[in-house]
Amino acid sequence: MAPLGARSVSTQIVRNRMKSVKNIQKITKAMKMVAASKLRAVQTRTENSRGLWQPFTALLGDAPSVDVKKNVIVAITSDKGLCGGINSTSVKVSRALHKLTSGPEKESKYVILGEKGKVQLVRDSRSSIEMTVSELQKNPINYTQIAVLADDILKNVEYDALRVVFNKFHSVISFKPTMVTILSPEVAEKESEAGGKIGDLDAYEIEGGETKSEILQNLAEFQFSCVLYNGALENACSELGARMSAMDSSSRNAGDMLDRLTLTYNRTRQASITTELTEIISGASALEG
């Protein structure tokens, strides 16, 4: 005969596995609900923030392909994982942009917002990282917080062009990698003098005694804070949407695994019962014989 309890070992293992999967499913469902509740609030603020920086494109123009010597790539990522591929997407775009804007007479640096972006970029670009910021989403994102951060970045980095990389939110299952370029006042003025539309303020009536350089300086600073505010909200919205989608997939996968484990458990239990019945009948037959 087999040792005592040998037949029940396999069913016990399957039962423990089922319990673990049920607990994981509870966690993923809870995380999906938390992400959904946060998403509703952040989505409204994100949509409202889009109107802040978009007028700057009409006023100052947009120049993603402008060729300058000092580029600073501001990569916006999340501090937490379990949100699909949004961080990998931002990092890939940032690396490609860094490669394009680097050269013998060019300098390209990173400013990284978010722990996940820092972890990935520090592996191969440690010397290019100028500044890192984490726990940006510890509290609800507000413009005052972002304006202070933007001012801190402008004080600590030298740039001809700031290139802000983030994920623009479209829906719970869709986000688009986006880059917005903010030129320094000096570069914007040079582009304007060269006959370009960038920084061309001649079509507007300017009140007060400020010079064109001072106006461009103020506009560049305000533009950067508005773009950074919108980018942080867009990325937070994309993160929550991606987490909802990821946790929903995880919950469904856990349900499928639970169904398979239940089937395995029932078959194993039935086989054990059948074996025991066969042994009982065989033993009774042997006693009668």
Image (tube, rainbow, N blue to C red):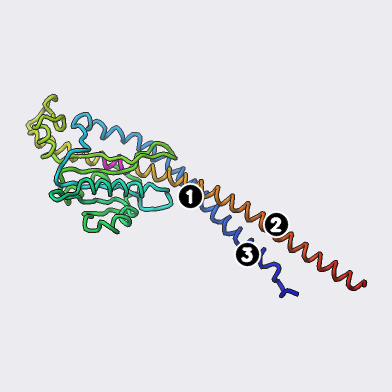
Instruction: Kindly indicate whether the residue at mark 1 contacts the one at mark 2 (C-beta within 8 angstroms).
Output: no
Stretch of the chain drawn in magenta:
227-232
Q: Compare marks 2 and 1 and give the one earlier in the sequence.
A: 1
Q: Residues within 10 Å of mark 3 (few under 14, many from 20)?
A: few
- 6 relative to 218 in the view: left or right: right
Distance of mark 1 from mark 3, alpha carbons? Answer: 27 Å
Distance of mark 2 from mark 3, alpha carbons? Answer: 13 Å
SS state under label 2: helix
Does residue 29 belong to the magenta stretch? Answer: no
Amino acid tagged 3: Ile
Q: Name the magenta segment's main secondary structure.
A: helix
173 relative to 127, above or below? above
- Residue that appears at 31% across and 34% down: 50
Quadrant assignment for the C terminus: bottom right
- Residue that appears at 12% across and 34% down: 191
SS state under label 3: helix
Instruction: Say which residue label 1 marks.
Output: 31
Residue 111 locus on image (x, y percent): 24, 51
Instruction: Say which residue label 3 marks.
Output: 13
- Residue that appears at 11% across and 26% down: 202
Quadrant assignment for the N terminus: bottom right
Residue 116 locus on image (x, y percent): 34, 54
Q: Which mark is residue 266?
A: 2
Q: Residues within 10 Å of mark 1 (few under 14, many from 20)?
A: some
Q: How many marks?
A: 3
- 101 relative to 7 in the view: left or right: left
285 relative to 44, above or below? below
- Residue that appears at 28% across and 53% down: 133
